[in-house]
C-alpha cells in the first residue's frame, strides 16, 4: 500500500457495515455491552486515526462508528489486509513488519501525523468527511487535525515512551489521554513509585533508582533480600520482568530484562524491588477529566498469569470486601490527582493474604482487560476517553458507579499451552468461528478466517468475555463459550483456559499469581479424563464413526466398501485411546446410540451435521459440545472434549486385530539436537563448535513475539556445529 491511500473498496464497506453495530451480549438485560449513547448536543471529533493494530484498533473503531466519527487505520506492510484496516474508512502504511520499523518507529508515526493531517481536507465524502476542525487520533485514540493535533498511542508500542511524548509536545501535538507530565511520571516505574509514596499510596520496598550493571543488581538484591523482582522502568505487559531467588538468577534476569525492555519499549532501564511471594494481582480502573474530577470504577482480579502476563481476569474480585475496595479505589484516585491525570487509566496493586495492598504501577492507557469493567459498570471507556479529551466534565459521580453482575475475560492466544503454559505458535487460521451465537458473550478480536499469526506481533487471537448476574453464571457461560470456539490452523491455549475456569481452586476463588505453577507443578498436561469421561469420549467417537460410515454409504452407494456393516443396527468396534484399546458394542435406534464400553453403558443422542466442526451431543441425558477437529480414512478421529484434543482410532474388531501386526514408526532420536520449541529469531549464540557444555547450560537465545527465551542443553555434550542464523 502507498504511503497514504484511500480505499473505498466493496470489501471495506462490507466490513464497515458488519462492525458498525455488533449485537450486544454483555448486560443482564441483553440490551447493551456498555453505554455508547452520547448526549445529542455533545460535539467530539470528526475523524480518528488508530495507530495501533489488532483487536484494540478494532475495538476503538466500533465505538467511533457508534459516535459518528470517521476512522483511519495505521498499519505495517504485512498488516495491509488486516481486519482493522478493512474496518476503517481510510488506511496509511507506516513501514515494514518489524515493530521497530513501523509501530515503534517514531519518525514514521510523526510523518503519518503530518501527512494525514495535511491531506485530510478533500477526501471523498463516501469514505470520510472533510477535516475542517476535525481530528485524527493515533492508537487507542490518536488524533490529528489540520488546526489542532492530538495523539494517544494505545497500549504497548510507544504508549509509555516519554521521548515520543516529548516529540509530540514539541510539535504541538497533545494526547487524547493524560498530559505529557502524567504519561512521563507514571510511565517511568521509578518516578511513579516516588510520586506514589508522596501521595501516601502504599508501595513495595525496593531500590528507588536505575540499576546500571549486573554487579549493581546483585548488590541491591542482596541488600533488599531475596526474592526480588527485576523489571523494566518503562513499559508493561510482563515484558522485561524477571523474578530472581539468588545471585545467578539476578545476573541472568538483569541481562534478559534489559534486552527485552530495549526491544519492546526502546528503553533498557531497570529497577529492583522486593518480590511479594504468593500475592494477588488486583487493579483499579480510574477515570478523570480535565477539571479535577476523578473516579474509581471498581477492581479487576488479574492473578491468573504466566510469565507475569495475564491469562484470565474477572471483575469484581472474590477476595475484596467493601472496605478494602474503597481504600484501594481512594488511593488510586489520590495518585491520579497527584499527577493531574485526565483520561482512563489503571492503577495496579499486589495484595497479600492479609488484604494489605501495595502499589505496583500505573498504566496511562486503556488496559487490555477493560471490557470486564465495561460489563459491570455499563460504561464505554473508549467513549469516555474521547469525551474527556474534548474537554467535557465527567457526567457521573462516585456513588453512580455500580457493580452489576460479574464478568470474566479469557485471553485466547496462539500458543502451545503444553510448553511453559504457552509458547508462541504461528500459522494461518484455516477455520475460525467465534461463539457469538451465545448470549452474554463478547469477543474482542482483530482477526478473521484466513488471517496469519506471525512472529512479529503479540500472539493474541482475541479476548473472550462472558457476563452473568452472578460469578457462577459467568463461569458457566465461559465454559460454554470455550467449547463453542472454533480455531483451526494454529495451536491455541483453549485447553488451558478451559481447565483454569473449571478447576475447583479457581471456582472457590483460592487463587494467586502462583496459581499455574502450584496447580500444575509438572507443567500443563491437558484435561485428565476420569472413568466416566473416558467412557463418554469413547462412546461419542464410536457413534460419530458409525454415523460417518452410514452417511458415506448413502452418498457413494453399494459400490463403496464400508468399514461397518451398513444394513445392521449393531456393531462391534475397537477404539484406541493412547496406548489402550477398548472393545465396544454399539446399537443405533433413530438418532440414539447405546454403547457398551468398559463395563458401563453410555447413551449418545445427536442429529449432528458431520460437515460442521461443532458436534452438539446429549450424553446420558446431559447436553455437551464436542468439536471434530479431523477425521481420516484410517479411522483416526481428533476430538476436542473438555477443551483438550484427544486422538482416538475407531476400527472394526477384525481391522484392529490385523493392525496389531503392522510395523510401528520409530520416533526420531532428537537427544543430540537442540530444537527451538517455537519459531523466532536467534539473537545470541552462547557456544561455538568444539565447546563442551554441561546439562542446563545456555546454548542460545530466541526472541519470539517480543519475549526472549534461553535454550539450554538437555545433557552434557560437545557442540559439533550450528546452522547459520
Image: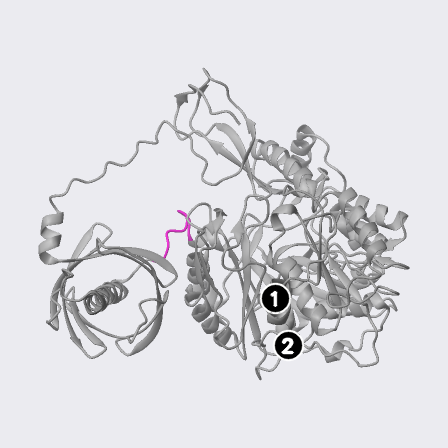
Compared to residue 615, the image places residue 517 above or below, namely above
To which quarter of the image does residue 396 belong? bottom right
Query: In the image as oriented, which residue stretches furthest toward the bottom?
Result: 29
Mark 1 vs 2, N-terminal side: 1
What span is in magenta?
A: 520-527
Q: Is residue 335 magenta?
A: no
Q: Position of residue 457 (x, y in %)?
A: 59, 47
Q: Position of residue 286 (x, y in %)?
A: 74, 66
Residue situated in front as seen by the camera: 251 or 111: 111
Q: Regarding mark 2 in the picture, which secondary structure is present there?
A: loop
Residue 15 image label: 1
Q: Position of residue 391 (x, y in %)?
A: 86, 69
Residue 725 shows in this picture: yes
Q: Which residue is mark 2?
A: 403
Q: Position of residue 684 (x, y in %)?
A: 57, 28
Residue at image location 60% in from the left, 55% down from the top: 82
Residue at image location 31% in from the left, 31% down from the top: 669
Compared to residue 710, the image places residue 598 above or below, namely below
Residue at image location 8% in from the left, 55% down from the top: 654
Residue 321 shows in this picture: no
Residue situated in front as seen by the camera: 576 or 261: 576
Q: CA distance from mark 1 to mark 2?
A: 34 Å
Check disc 2: other Cα within 10 Å, few if <14, some if 14-19, many if 20+: some
Q: Is residue 521 magenta?
A: yes
Residue situated in front as seen by the camera: 260 or 82: 82
Check disc 1: other Cα within 10 Å, few if <14, some if 14-19, many if 20+: some
Compared to residue 245, the image places residue 345 above or below, namely below
Amino acid at each position: 500500500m502507498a504511503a497514504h491511500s484511500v480505499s473505498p473498496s466493496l470489501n471495506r464497506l462490507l466490513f464497515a457495515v458488519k462492525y458498525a453495530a455488533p449485537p450486544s451480549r454483555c448486560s443482564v438485560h441483553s440490551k447493551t455491552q456498555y453505554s455508547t449513547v452520547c448526549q445529542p448536543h455533545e460535539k467530539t471529533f470528526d475523524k480518528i486515526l488508530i495507530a495501533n493494530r489488532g483487536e484494540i484498533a478494532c475495538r476503538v473503531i466500533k465505538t467511533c462508528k457508534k459516535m459518528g466519527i470517521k476512522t483511519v487505520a495505521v498499519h505495517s506492510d504485512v498488516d495491509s489486509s488486516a481486519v482493522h484496516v478493512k474496518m476503517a474508512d481510510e488506511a496509511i502504511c507506516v513501514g515494514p513488519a518489524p515493530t521497530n520499523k513501523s509501530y515503534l518507529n517514531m519518525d514514521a508515526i510523526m510523518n503519518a501525523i503530518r501527512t494525514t493531517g495535511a491531506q485530510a481536507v478533500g477526501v471523498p465524502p463516501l469514505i470520510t468527511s472533510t477535516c475542517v476542525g476535525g481530528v485524527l487520533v493515533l492508537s487507542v485514540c490518536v488524533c490529528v487535525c489540520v488546526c489542532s493535533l492530538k495523539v494517544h498511542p494505545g497500549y504497548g508500542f510507544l504508549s509509555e515512551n516519554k521521548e515520543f511524548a516529548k516529540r509530540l509536545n514539541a510539535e504541538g501535538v497533545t494526547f487524547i489521554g493524560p498530559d505529557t507530565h502524567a504519561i512521563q511520571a507514571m510511565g517511568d516505574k521509578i518516578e511513579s513509585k516516588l510520586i506514589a509514596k508522596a501521595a501516601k499510596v502504599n508501595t513495595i520496598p525496593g531500590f528507588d533508582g536505575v540499576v546500571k550493571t549486573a554487579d549493581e543488581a546483585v548488590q541491591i538484591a542482596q541488600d533488599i533480600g531475596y526474592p526480588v523482582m527485576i523489571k523494566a522502568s518503562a513499559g508493561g505487559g510482563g515484558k522485561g520482568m524477571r523474578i530472581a531467588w539468588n545471585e545467578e538468577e539476578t545476573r541472568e534476569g538483569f541481562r534478559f530484562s534489559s534486552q527485552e525492555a530495549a526491544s519492546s519499549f526502546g528503553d533498557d532501564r531497570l529497577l529492583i524491588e522486593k518480590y511479594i511471594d504468593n500475592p494477588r494481582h488486583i487493579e483499579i480502573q480510574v477515570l478523570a477529566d480535565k477539571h479535577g474530577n476523578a473516579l474509581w470504577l471498581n477492581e479487576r482480579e488479574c492473578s491468573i498469569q504466566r510469565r507475569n502476563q495475564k491469562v484470565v481476569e474477572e471483575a469484581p474480585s472474590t477476595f475484596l470486601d467493601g472496605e478494602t475496595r474503597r481504600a484501594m479505589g481512594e488511593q488510586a484516585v489520590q495518585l491520579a490527582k497527584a499527577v493531574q491525570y485526565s483520561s482512563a487509566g489503571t492503577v495496579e496493586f499486589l495484595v497479600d493474604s492479609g488484604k494489605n495492598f501495595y502499589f505496583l504501577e500505573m498504566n496511562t492507557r486503556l488496559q487490555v482487560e477493560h471490557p470486564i469493567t465495561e460489563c459491570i459498570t455499563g460504561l464505554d471507556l473508549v467513549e469516555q476517553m474521547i469525551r474527556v479529551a474534548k474537554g467535557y466534565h465527567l457526567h457521573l459521580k462516585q456513588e453512580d458507579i455500580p457493580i452489576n453482575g460479574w464478568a470474566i475475560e479469557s485471553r485466547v492466544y496462539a500458543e502451545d499451552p503444553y510448553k511453559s503454559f504457552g509458547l508462541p505458535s504461528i500459522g494461518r487460521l484455516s477455520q475460525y468461528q467465534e461463539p457469538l451465537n451465545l448470549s452474554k458473550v463478547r469477543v474482542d478480536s482483530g482477526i478473521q478466517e484466513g488471517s496469519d499469526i506471525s512472529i512479529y506481533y503479540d500472539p493474541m487471537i482475541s479476548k473472550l468475555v462472558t457476563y452473568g448476574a452472578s460469578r457462577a453464571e459467568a463461569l458457566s457461560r465461559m465454559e460454554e463459550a470455550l467449547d463453542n470456539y472454533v480455531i483451526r490452523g494454529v495451536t491455541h491455549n483453549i485447553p488451558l483456559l478451559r481447565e483454569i475456569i473449571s478447576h475447583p481452586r479457581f471456582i472457590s476463588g483460592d487463587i494467586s499469581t502462583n496459581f499455574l505453577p502450584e496447580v500444575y507443578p509438572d507443567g500443563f498436561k491437558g484435561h485428565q479424563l476420569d472413568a466416566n469421561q473416558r467412557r463418554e469420549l469413547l462412546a461419542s467417537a464410536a457413534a460419530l464413526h458409525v454415523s460417518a460410515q452410514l452417511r458415506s454409504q448413502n452418498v457413494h452407494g453399494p459400490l463403496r466398501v464400508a468399514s461397518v456393516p451398513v444394513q445392521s443396527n449393531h456393531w462391534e468396534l475397537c477404539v484406541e485411546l493412547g496406548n489402550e484399546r477398548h472393545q465396544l458394542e454399539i446399537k443405533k435406534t433413530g438418532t440414539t446410540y447405546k454403547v457398551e464400553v468398559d463395563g458401563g453403558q453410555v447413551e449418545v443422542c445427536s442429529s449432528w451435521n458431520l460437515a460442521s466442526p461443532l458436534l452438539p451431543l446429549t450424553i446420558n441425558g446431559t447436553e455437551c459440545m464436542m468439536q471434530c477437529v479431523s477425521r481420516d480414512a484410517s479411522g483416526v478421529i481428533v476430538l476436542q472434549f473438555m477443551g483438550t484434543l484427544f486422538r482416538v482410532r475407531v476400527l472394526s474388531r477384525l481391522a484392529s486385530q490385523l493392525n496389531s501386526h503392522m510395523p510401528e514408526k520409530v520416533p526420531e532420536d532428537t537427544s543430540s539436537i537442540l530444537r527451538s520449541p517455537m519459531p523466532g529469531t536467534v539473537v545470541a549464540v552462547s557456544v561455538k563448535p568444539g565447546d563442551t557444555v554441561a546439562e542446563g547450560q545456555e546454548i542460545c537465545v530466541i526472541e519470539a513475539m517480543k519475549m526472549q527465551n534461553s535454550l539450554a542443553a538437555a545433557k552434557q555434550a560437545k557442540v559439533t556445529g550450528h546452522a547459520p542464523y
